[in-house]
Amino acid sequence: MFTLAEVASLNDIQPTYRILKPWWDVFMDYLAVVMLMVAIFAGTMQLTKDQVVCLPALQSAVNAKAQASISGDADVTPEFEATTGQDKGSSMRTVSFESAPTITPDIPLSRTTYSQLLSTVSNQEPRNEKEDSLGRKTYLDYQQYVFINQMCYHVALPWYSKYFPYLALIHTIILMVSSNFWFKYPKTCSKIEHFVSILGKCFESPWTTKALSETACEDSEENKQRLTGAQSLPKHVSTSSDEGSPSASTPMITKSGFKFSAEKPVIEVPSMTILDKKDGEQAKALFEKVRKFRAHVEDSDLIYKLYVVQTVIKTVKFIFILCYTANFVNAISFDHKCKPEVEHLIGYKEFECTHNMAYMLKKLLISYISLICVYGFVCLYTLFWLFRIPLKEYSFEKVREESSFSDIPDVKNDFAFLLHMVDQYDQLYSKRFGVFLSEVSENKLREISLNHEWTFEKLRQHVSRNTQDKQELHLFMLSGVPDAVFDLTDLDVLKLELIPEAKIPAKISQMTNLQELHLCHCPAKVEQTAFSFLRDNLRCLHVKFTDVAEIPAWVYLLKNLRELYLIGNLNSENNKMIGLESLRELRHLKILHVKSNLTKVPSNITDVAPHLTKLVIHNDGTKLVVLNSLKKMMNVAELELQNCELERIPHAIFSLTNLQELDLKSNSIRTIEEVISFQHLKRLTCLKLWHNKIVNIPSSITHVKNLESLYLSNNKLESLPVAVFSLQKLRCLDVSYNSIAVIPVEIGLLQNLQHLHITGNKVDILPKQLFKCVKLRTLSLGQNCIISIPDKIGQLLQLTHLELNGNCLDRLPATLGQCRLLRKSGLVVEDHLFDTLPSEVKEVLNQDTNITFANGI
C-alpha cells in the first residue's frame, strides 16, 4: 500500500509554477488530494478490518422432515438432551471427523445417524472422562467457521467491494498525473521553466518599476495631447509621445499630438531616475532573453495542444469513472448469500454472510462519486474556456492604452497561451512583462544606461585632433548618442559609426563650432530644432550606407551644405531608384564625393552641377559607361574617376573648360592619344594617370602647356619622350614603378621641377643635367640599378628628401653635406652606405633642422 507522503510527491509542482495554475487547476488539485485521502483511508480500513461473518442457512423443508423423524423416537431425545445438558457444565469435548460428525444444537440428524451418535458417545463417555486431563482441545467448530468466512469472502463478496479503494487510488493518481503532465513533458517543460524564470525577473526588475513610474509621472499636458491624438488615429497607429522615425516626406522626428516649427522649442520628455550599472545591465539582458524566447516559442503551439489533450483525457476519465462506478454502488451490500460447495465437509449448503465494512465503503464510495462529479464539471468548464476565446492570440491593447509603450506587439501561439494562463493568476504580471516587449522601453533603457556610462569627462578623453587640427570625436557601435556629447561645445567634427538608434536632439544647437558630421551606417533621426541648426551650420557631411534607404531624408534639405560624401551601393537591384534626386535642393553644394558601383553618372547629379566645383566618383571596379552628363558640369575644377574600368580618356571631359585637376587613377587606360584635346583646357594644371596600363606618352602632351603636375606611376612606360621636358611649368613628375631605363638629358630643361619620383624602374646612370634642376626638393631614386651618385648632387641646395635605397651603390658622395636642408630623417638609404660618409658630413646630416634655420637659411 502507498503512503500518503509517497503519493503526494506526484503532485509536487515547483512553487514558481503557481502562476501558470488557474483557479480550476488549483481546485482540481485539491479535489484530487481529497480523493486520494478517501482512497487511502478506504484502503487502510479494508486492510485492517475488512472481513465477512457467515452462519449456516436452515432450509425449512429439511428442518420439518428432520423434526418428524426425531419425534418417533421420543425416548431417545430426552436422553440425548440430558447427556448434552450434563456436558454443558464440563469442558467442551471435540470429536474428530474420523470417529463421528460434529454435533451442534441446530443440525438436524436422521434416526440412524442419531442412534449411531448416541451409541458412540455412550461407549466413549467413560473413556473420555478418564482421559479428560490428557486430551487436547481443538476448537474444531471455530476453525470451520473461519474456513467458511474466508471462502465466502472470495466467493460471495462482489469484486468491487474488495477492490474499490485500489481503483479509486489508481484513478486519482492518473488524474493527478494528467493535471501536471505539461509541467513534466521535456519539450514543454523547458519552455515553461524558461518562461517562468524570465517572467519572475521581469516582474522584479527595477527597470519595470521605473518604466511604469515614468509613464505615470508624465506631464499632464503631454498626456492630454497624446490622448487627443489617440482619438483621431486608428488603434494600430502608435500614439506614443516618443520620437518616431522620419519618413520620406518628413525628414525629421515628430511627436504625436505636436506640430514643430523652427521657432518653437522642442518639448522634452522628463528623464527618469538613472539606474545603477548592475540593474541596467540586467535589464538589457532581460530584453535580449525576452526577444529570443519570443522567437523560440511563437513558432509552435505544442504547449497549448498538450494542455488541451490532458484536459480532454481528464474529462474522458471522469465520464468513464462515473459510468462504471454508478453500476456498482448497489453491489456494496451488508448481506450476502454464500454457497461454498463444501457440504461434504460441513454438512450445510448455504450460508448467510455479513460484510462488516459495507456501510463504511458505501459511504466512502458515495463521497468519491460526489468528488468525481465536481471534478468533472470543472473539467468541462476548462474545456469551455479553452475553446471559447482564441487562446493562441494575445493582445496588449489594454497595456498600450494605460502606458506610453504603444508599440508593444501582439503575440501568438504558445507565447500567447502562456500569457493567458498568467492572466488567470494575476494580470499585473502581463502588464509588467509587456514593458520588455516594447522597443520604446528598450530604447529608453539604452539611453539611460548610455548616459550613465558615457559621462562628459569620459567623452572629453576621447576627443582628439585630426590631420586638419580640428577637434574630433568618434563614437563607434554604441546603443545611441550620449546626451553629454552635445555639451562638447568646442567640437568641430562628430563621427557616428554603427549606431542604428542615433537621435540628434535640440541640444546640438549648443555645438556652435560643429561643421562636419559623419554618419557611418547610422540612419540618424533629428528633431525639428536640431534640423534647423544643422541646416544653417553644417558644412560637411559624410554618409556611409548599405542601402539607399539608410540615407536620412533630412540630408537632402541641408541647404547650406558645402561638401557631401556618399559611400555605399547605388546600383543594386534594390536601389534602382537612386536617392540622389533631391540633391537639387543643395544649392550651395561644392564638393560631391560618390564611392559606389555606378554604371553611369546619374543625371540627377547634373541638377546640382552648376554649383559643383569638385566631383569624385570611386567605383568598385564596375565599368562606368555613360559619361555624357559630365558636359553640363561647367564649373567643376576637380574631377576624379577612379577604378571605373575606363579604357580611354572620356571625351566628355574635354568640355570642362574650368577643369584644373583630372584624376583617372586605377582604370584600364592603355593609350592617351586624346591628351592633345587637353590643350582646350587652359586651366588644367594636374593630370593623374597613375595605376593604368599606359605604354607610351604621345608627343602631343607638349600642347598642355600649363601642366604643373604629371603622375604616371604604376604603368608600363619604357621611356620618357623629350616632349615631356618641354612642359616648362612642370613642378612634379612621378613615373615610379614603370620600366624606364634611361633618364633623358633634356630633364635639365625643367627648371621649375621640385618633385621627381623615379622609384622602381631600371635606371642605372643619372645624367649630370638632372642636377641643373636646382629647385628639386624631393628626389626618389630607390629600387633602380644606379651604381654611383655624381658629386654634383651638392648643387641641390633645396633638397629635403632623397631616396636611394635598393640600388647598387658602394658609397655616397661627400657633397651631400652641401645640401643644407637635407637631414638624416629625409635620407632613405642603407645604414652601411650612410657609414661611408665622412664624419663631418654625418654631423651636418644629424643636425636639427631648427638650428640651420636659426642661422638664417
Image: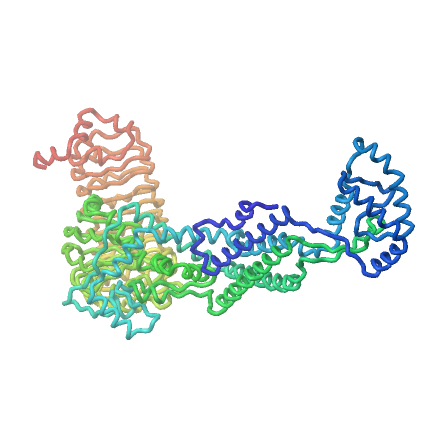
Q: Residue furthest top?
A: 839
Quarter of the image with the C terminus in it = top left
Front residue (pair 21, 726)? 21
Residue 67 % position (x, y): 85, 57
Q: How many marks?
A: 0
> Residue at position x 87%, y 43% from top?
100
> Residue at position x 43%, y 57% from top?
294
Query: Horizontal placement of 115 versus 666: left or right?
Result: right
Q: How is the image coloured?
A: rainbow
Q: Is residue 750 visible?
A: no
Query: Horizontal placement of 90 versus 463: left or right?
Result: right
Residue 432 % position (x, y): 34, 57
Q: Where 342 falls versus 558 (above or below)?
A: above
Front residue (pair 464, 526)? 526
> Residue at position x 17%, y 62% from top?
533
Front residue (pair 125, 236)? 125
Front residue (pair 653, 326)? 326
Residue 439 % position (x, y): 33, 59
